[in-house]
Amino acid sequence: MHLKGQTVVIFGGKTGLLGQALTDALKKAGAKPIPLSSSDCDILDPTKVERLLEKKAPDLIINAAAYTQVDLAEDEKELAFALNATAPPLLANMAARLNVPFIHFSTDFVFKGDKKTPYSIHDEQNSSSVYGTSKAEGEHNLLKLGYELTLIIRISWLFGPGRANFVEKILGLSETRETLTVVDDQTGSPSYAPDIATNTLALLEHDATGIYHLANSGETTWCGLATAAVNLAGTDCSVEPVPTSAYPTKAVRPAYSVLDLSGFIQTTGITPRKWEDALKDYVLNDLKKRPTS
C-alpha cells in the first residue's frame, strides 16, 4: 500500500502513546491521518462508527484504542472485554464494507510467560490476566471474522513521547529518591512507540496481513530497563532488583514475554534497532535529559 495522499482514520490516535506516534509517522509519509479520541467517536457504538467512517471515507483504518489498565481490568472485566474483544471485529467489519485495510494492535500479555525462548506468532495464547485474555479474544474474533485485509500486530513494553509510561515514571522518581527497587524476574522486549509506528508503515507498504510481532531488538527485565534509563539521564539514584513477589499486583504478569520478530524481518527486510538505542533516543532527545556531570 502506498501511503502518500491516503486518508487514515486512527482510533486512539489523539491521546494514546502509540496512536500519537502513528499519526506523526503517517504525516511524515505524506498520508492524511485523522486521529480520534473516545470523545470523538465511541468505538462501542456501531452506528456512530459507521457515520464517522462514511463521512471521512478512509483508505485505511487503524485501531490503536484499547483498555490497557492491566490491574483495573481484573475488576472492570466487562469494560475490558467490550473494548478489547468486542470492538475490534466491529471496526474490522466496517473496514470490510469499505474494502480498506484494517490494522489492530495486540499485546505480549496474550501469552502466559512460561517459555524461555521468544514467542512466535504460532504459540498458544493462555494469558493469566483479564487484560491478556480480553486482547487474545479480540484477536480470535478478528480471525473468526475472516476479513482478508486485516493486520494484527502484537507489541510489548511500550514507551515513548506523548504520554506517561514506565520509563518516564522511573526517571521522575529517580530525581527525588536515592534508591529505587524494580522487579528483575519479568523479561520482555521494550518497544519505542515511534519505531513501532515506522515499522508498522513498513508492513503496510509490503501489503502484510495476518499476525506479526513488533518490538525493538533485544530483551531485558524491568529492572534492566530502569537501570539503563537512569544511567542515561545521569541521576544520582541506584536501581536495585527485587522479585515480583515484592510488588503484589491484582493481575498476573508474564514472567517471560519476549517476542520473536523474524516474521517482520523476513517480510520487510528490516531488523528493528536495539532497545538500548531507542531508549537513548527517548531519554536524551524526547525527554531532553542530560547528565549533570
Image (cartoon, rainbow, N blue to C red):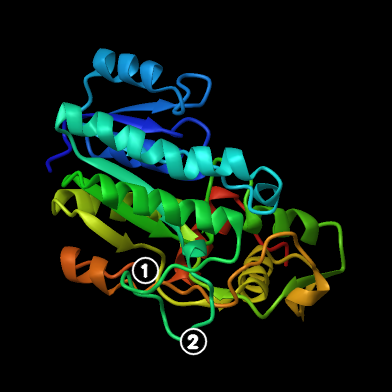
Q: x and y percent of residue 113 in the render?
A: 53, 76
For the image shown, how many numbered marks are present on the structure? 2
Give the numbered dot on residue 221.
none
Task: Provide the residue designation for mark 1.
Answer: 273
The residue located at (64%, 71%) in the rendering is: 222
Sequence-first disc among 2 and 1:
2
User: What percent of the width, then of the height, locates residue 156?
Assistant: 48, 62
Marks 2 and 1 sit apart, C-alpha to C-alpha, by 22 Å
Q: Is residue 134 visible?
A: yes
- The front one of 60 and 32 is 60
Which image quadrant is residue 128 in?
Answer: bottom right
**129 or 207, nearer to the observer:** 129
Amino acid on which disc 2 is placed: Lys
Where disc 1 sits, the SS reads loop
Residue 97 location (% of width, % of height): 18, 28
Badge 1 crowding class, 10 Å Cα cut-off, few under 14, some 14 to 19, many 20 or more, is some
The amino acid pointed to by label 1 is: Arg
Give the residue at x 52% y 57%.
133
Q: Nearer the viewer, residue 243 or 96?
A: 96
Q: Is the residue 167 above or below the residue 23 in the image? A: below
User: Toward which corner of the image does residue 4 lie, by quadrant?
Assistant: top left
The residue indicated by pointer 2 is 116
Asked if residue 66 can be seen in this view, the reply is no
User: Residue 24, relative to residue 238: is it above or below?
Assistant: above
